[in-house]
Structures are given as C-alpha cells and as structure tokens.
Image: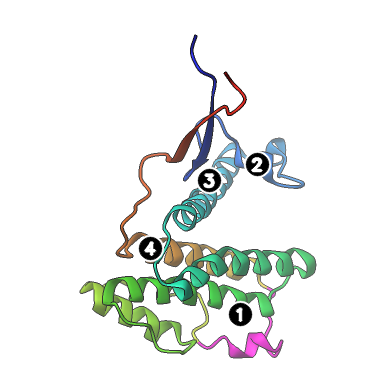
Amino acid sequence: MIEPLFVLKFPNKVLTDENPFDWVVSAPIKTALSSEEFKMLMQDASKRADRIRNIHSFIRIVPSKNEEMNTLLQHIPAHLEWFVDEYLLNRKSSIGIWELNFAVESALKFNYFTNSGQKADYVHDLQKLYNNCLKALKIDSKLLKYLPLTPIAYRYGEKVINDSHGISNIYDEVLEIIEWALSTSKTDYSVSGDGIEMVIRNPYFH
C-alpha cells in the first residue's frame, strides 16, 4: 500500500490554473472593459502577484546566520502590508510611502551584507544604499525612478500622494527592487522553478 503523503506548495508565481482577480475584493468586471484593457489589467495583476510570491518564497527558505539580517528579511512583507492597509483605507499615501522606503531599505541592506560581508550604513538614503549594493556586486543598474529618495516628509504626514497612477508606479518599482535585491544576494539557498514544495508524511498512517 502506498503511504499517504501531504504535499505542501508555496509557488513563486501565479500558476496556470489561477486567476489573480479571484483574490481581489470587488474585482473588475470583465464586461465593463474592452478585451485589450482586461488583458493588460490581468498582466499587471499577474506580474505583481509573481513578484510578491517570489519575495515571500525567498524570505521563507533563505535564513541568515546573522540575527539582525533575519529581522530585516521578516520586516519586508510587514512594511509592504502596512502600505497597502493605509492606501486602501484612505485612497492616498503618506506614511505608506515611508513604509515602502523601509521595505526597500531592508532588502538593500540584506543584499549588501551578503555580498560584502559588512553591515550597511545606518541611513535611510535609498540611492546611497543602492549604489553600495551595485559596488559590492560590481555591476551597473538603474532601478530607482519613481520612489521618493527623500521620504522623511511622508513619515510625518507633511507630504501626501493622491495620484493613484503615481502610487501604482512606486509600488511596482518597490516590488521590482526588492525582488532584485533578494535574487542577487549571496546565500546558500535559492528559489527556482515553481517555488517551494514539501512532501510531508502522514504521522497517523500505520
């Protein structure tokens, strides 16, 4: 007799039999959009879901021997969620932009530590942190375009972003930078293929 097993999967992308709109409260009605508009919206939703899942997969399986670095990793999804909570509540973003800054900051500091063996400077300057990561990796890249480089005013509500398109660009850039920072980190583990799959034996089967 074949022993029963549980297969636990953590995919790092949207699977072929999944629809990202199934996860959205008050999802867009397909008939209210043109076929091209709906297709583009689906592509955007799938791209975001792919990146979010990939980020979570990395954080789940890539432990660091440094406790401070582990803490940075665990903070990334929390900061992303706090941004979403604020935006959904107010339809604008102020403190949420600061949270996104922290999410990126945590990812960049983790990247720099794994590639250089040194802790990053205790600064919130994303451009400086990003440039240091590039130096450690010995590559050239340009990802920072929409995210405010001086986010301190958003922390205290002195600045607010009401433009939904602008916020969308910032959020997409944040996911891209975090995914890049984690994927180029030097670790003993990697996430590839369709993500994580664990086969667990049924302890009650005899």
To which quarter of the image does residue 88 belong? Answer: bottom right
Q: Residue at x 75, y 68 (%)?
A: 91
Q: Which mark is residue 46?
A: 3
Closest to the observer, 80 or 42: 80
- Disc 3 versus disc 4: nearer the observer: 4
Badge 4 element: helix
Badge 1 element: helix
Q: How many marks?
A: 4
Q: Residue at x 48, y 77 (%)?
A: 105
Closest to the observer, 75 or 174: 75
| Circle 4 residue | 180
For marks 3 and 4 on the same chain, the one whose residue lies earlier in the sequence: 3
- Residue 39 is at least partly visible in this image: yes
Under mark 2, the amino acid is Phe
Q: Are marks 3 and 4 in contact (CB under 8 Å)?
A: no
| Circle 1 residue | 98
Label 1 vs label 4: CA separation? 20 Å
Under mark 1, the amino acid is Trp
Q: Residue at x 63, y 90 (%)?
A: 153
Q: Are marks 3 and 1 in contact (CB under 8 Å)?
A: no
Q: Residues within 10 Å of mark 2 (few under 14, many from 20)?
A: some
For marks 4 and 2 on the same chain, the one whose residue lies earlier in the sequence: 2
For marks 3 and 1 on the same chain, the one whose residue lies earlier in the sequence: 3
